Image (cartoon, rainbow, N blue to C red):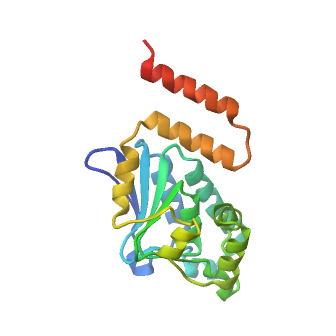
Amino acid sequence: MIRAERADDGEYRTVTIDRPEARNALTPEALDALERAVVDATEPVVLLRGAGSAFCAGADLGVVESLEDPAAFAGHGQRVADAIESADPVVIAGVDGAARGGGVELALACDLRVATSEATFAESGVSIGLFGAWGGTARLPRVVGEGVALDIACSARVVDAEEAREIGLVSRVVDDPAAVAREVADNDPGALGAVKRLVRAGARGAETAADERAAFERLHAERFGE
């Protein structure tokens, strides 16, 4: 269900949710496999994709309907999203097709989000009496702002690729997300890791000035030191 493949040049890893017959809906087992595929990556860049016509439909509804411990399932998804967010590589969500519910939340946990023109996004949980509980209620407003986040989450409406770019949900609309992975991977791995950690910390309101100086000093020594 989760495939991990190294690019021919070895510069990035593609992790594919490969369950197209279910629009790449995620079971608990798939969540664990997804976490391992991203966290265990030795490449500096990971491209997360979905097989077939969808990126990810979110949690498998058959699993959700039969949950005995809904809070534990929500916590499971939160841990996986947190692991993706804090993983060493720069993680890029390459959204081609539908991202719904938990699929949007996985994309939000990634460092970069790019979309093809076929991509669509929706936090559709409220339409069936639920909501995304894998960290999306915190990440979505950080990315698009509180007002837009509430509009998306409370309306369950579908956001197309161009609107997603306009509101900052994705940074680019591209023909091929792999081209972005190659572009990012064509840079120094140490610098990529430092920039990811510092930007992530700063976005959470952490004081990063001292860490920024230390990282710059270390990278400078590696690049120009004797």
In the image, is 25 to the left or to the right of 148? left
Indicate the position of residue 19 as horizontal and vertical percent values.
Answer: 41, 73
Residue at 34 percent of width and 64 percent of height:
176
* Farthest-out residue, top: 226
Q: Inspect this view and state whether residue 202 appears.
A: yes
Is residue 124 positioned above or below 205 on the image?
below
Residue at x 34% of width, y 57% of height: 179
Residue 16 or 211: which is nearer the viewer?
211
- 38 displayed left or right of 21: right
Residue 195 spot, x, y in % from top left: 55, 40
Q: Is residue 25 above or below residue 188?
A: below
Q: Residue furthest front?
A: 166
Q: Nearer the viewer, residue 77 or 221?
A: 221
Give the left or right position of residue 201, taking residue 12 as reference.
right
Residue 141 versus residue 62 in the image, above or below: above
In the rendered picture of this protein, how many numbered marks are placed on residues? 0
Q: Residue 183 at x, y = what percent?
A: 36, 49
Q: Report whether residue 57 is seen.
A: no
Q: Quadrant of the N terminus?
A: bottom left
Using the image, determine if residue 191 lies above or below residue 17.
Answer: above
Residue extending furthest toward the left: 8
Residue at 47% from the left image edge and 46% from the top image edge:
40
Horizontal side of 188 relative to 32 (left or right) equals left
At 43% from the left and 23% from the top, the residue drawn is 223
Identify the image quadrant of the C terminus. top left
